[in-house]
Amino acid sequence: MNAQLMIQPSSFIDAGIQIKSVGGLFLFKFSEDLQERLESLNEKQRESQLSSDEAVELTGILELDRIFTLLNAKIIAESA
């Protein structure tokens, strides 16, 4: 993926990231605001109303979501 075609996932870390205890494990989660933004952008995409700037933002958020999924899976696997 071309880095120029997305907002870098690291730009969401300060405001959009939380670490929450789930079943005794500390997992990476989106803040409520970032989760709502993701849902809003996904809805606009489904309706074909996503601007090019919003598409770039959505790509960055989805990449961060993939990173969190991998990290959380690793945390869960190593705790078993």
Image (cartoon, helix red, strand yellow):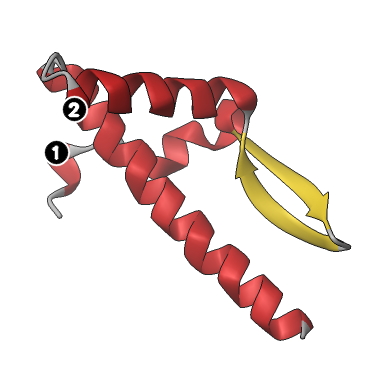
Residue indicated by mark 1: 5
Badges 2 and 1: C-beta atoms under 8 Å apart?
no
- The picture places residue 15, in percent across and down from the top left corner, at 59, 26
Rendered image quadrant of residue 49: top left
**Left or right, 57 with reference to 28:** left
Q: Secondary structure at mark 1?
A: helix
Q: What residue lies at 50% left-to-right and 21% top-to-bottom?
A: 36
Q: Residue at x 19, y 25 (%)?
A: 45
In space, the residues marked 2 and 1 are separated at their CA atoms by 9 Å
Q: Earlier in the sequence, mark 2 or mark 1?
A: 1
Determine the secondary structure under disc 2. helix
Type of residue at label 2?
Answer: Ala
Few, some or many residues within 10 Å of mark 1 (<14, 14–19, 20+): some
Q: Is residue 60 above or below residue 24?
A: above
Rendered image quadrant of residue 55: top left
Residue 8 seen in the current view:
no
Residue identified by numbered label 2: 55
Q: Is residue 32 above or below residue 78?
A: above
Q: Nearer the viewer, mark 2 or mark 1?
A: 2
